[in-house]
Image: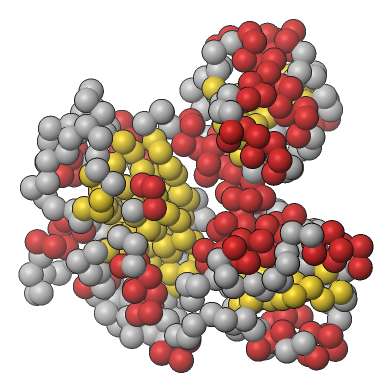
Amino acid sequence: MRVLVVGVGAVGTALAADLAEGHDVVAIDVDGDRVDAVSTRYDVLGVHGDGTDPDVLDEAGVDEADVVVTATDDDETNLTVCGSVTAISDAFTVALVEESAYLRAWRRSRGAYGADYLLDSTLRAARAISRLVDLPRAHEFEELAGGNVHVAEFEVAEGSPLAGRDPTAVGRSDCAVVSVLRDGAVDVLDPLESADADADTETGIEPLAAGDRVVVVGAPGGVENVAADVVADEDVAAVEDVVVLGSSATGRQVAHLLEERGRPARVVVESHERARDLADDLSETTLLVHDPTDPDFLEREHVGDADVVVVARENDQRGLLTSMLARSRGADRTVTVVDSAQYDVLFEEAGVDVAVHPRAEAAEEIARFTRGRRTENVVFVGRDGAEVFEVAVVEESLAAGHTLADLMDSLPDGTAVGALTRDGEYVAPDPDFELQAGDHVVVFARADVSDRALDQF
């Protein structure tokens, strides 16, 4: 697939790098140094020029492009590029925006601005954080198939009831463990084989241990019930107090989403001006004006006693310092917004429980447009070592009319069917279940075999 990425700043470069592994990518930017940097470092063709100019788009081969992603730092420029592309080609256009008003307008009139899809990476990251708030030890949580299938990645805690257990025995009738991630390796568990195996069958998978991560796929409620099994008994408690340190765009969105859910947070902002700005949208949220890196303030406000601390600062350096201070004051669970993946190790060493990357969230969303139109969702797990994708079965699909057992025989090693839906209802994997057009299938796959797995649909 040929993909054009217009704007290769931090976000565009990250997207171009991710897409270059499996697609023909062309990077366009008005900054020649940026173009040289991305084309030298990655397998990407660079074009120096203004992406709103049809002549530049022609030079980049827009007439042969399947997808065009606009990722400049300016919303208006991104939308203008989409309009230019739509006028001269049939490429599918995706625009990244930060101003939610554009997203609201586009939703009222799909195709507005010449964009086939508008993506607010800040909002997507905020939604990811708000979903993680209620799930202890969760590093990832997504809703697929219209909310009828949930996917979560949990870390097994010290003292967890699951430690020492066979991972194939962890699942329930409404969910299953499809993978164990440990020491950089991805072990795949097929729920169909687990269902057929007797208690004495050797699975070849070592018992779970503290620090292992398990990927669970299942019905709403089923995955959440596994969360209670994953953590130690003393960690199971209702989340009531959430503190947001910082007022970045993502932090603001998190506070707004929590308030919508009836769980207003305490938000620490750096200035009275920022507090007044936020107060217009957050009527139920407690706004505290102070420096989030003041240890005495954190102590006075009992930030360490909060159930969850969300760190959403303007840059990674401030985010790292704030996260470290929150942990030093006793915070049990910290979720931090991280812009650069290169800082992952530093944040882990600082004790951050979960790092949420807006760029990675955007990459997940864009990935489904580069996997074929039948791919509904893609979720990256295990630091890109694996993924979960949702695919719709159509009449001409190779899988239509075949049983799940037939499908699994055709899928490469390193894949597992985690769940299905039919007519909007969750269906547990069953070897004799016959697939038909309209069904949605949720598949776990190692990254090295995901494209071959998708080809079977």
Residue 100 position, x and y percent, is 69, 44
Q: Is residue 305 left or right of residue 447?
A: right
- Residue 156 makes an appearance in the image: yes
Question: Residue 84, relative to residue 286: is it above or below?
Answer: above
Q: Position of residue 104 (x, y in %)?
A: 64, 39
Residue at (69% x, 71% y) in the render: 284
Q: Quadrant of residue 259?
A: bottom right
Horizontal and vertical percent position of residue 223: 35, 67
Residue 113 figure quarter: top right
> Compared to 305, does 87 lie above or below?
above
The x, y position of residue 201, in whole percent, is 11, 69
Instruction: Tell me if residue 17 comes above or below residue 345 in the rendering.
Output: above
Q: Is residue 37 visible?
A: no
Q: Specify the quadrant that holds the C terminus.
A: top left
Depth check: 210 or 370 in front?
370
Which of these two is toward me, 214 or 437?
437
**Relative to 313, residue 399 above or below:** above
Left/right of residue 236 with respect to residue 398 in the rendered view: right
Horizontal placement of 238 versus 194: left or right? right
User: In terms of image quadrants, where is residue 73?
Assistant: top right
Q: Nearer the viewer, residue 227 or 190?
A: 227
- Residue plotted at (51% across, 27% down): 23
Numbered-mark total: 0
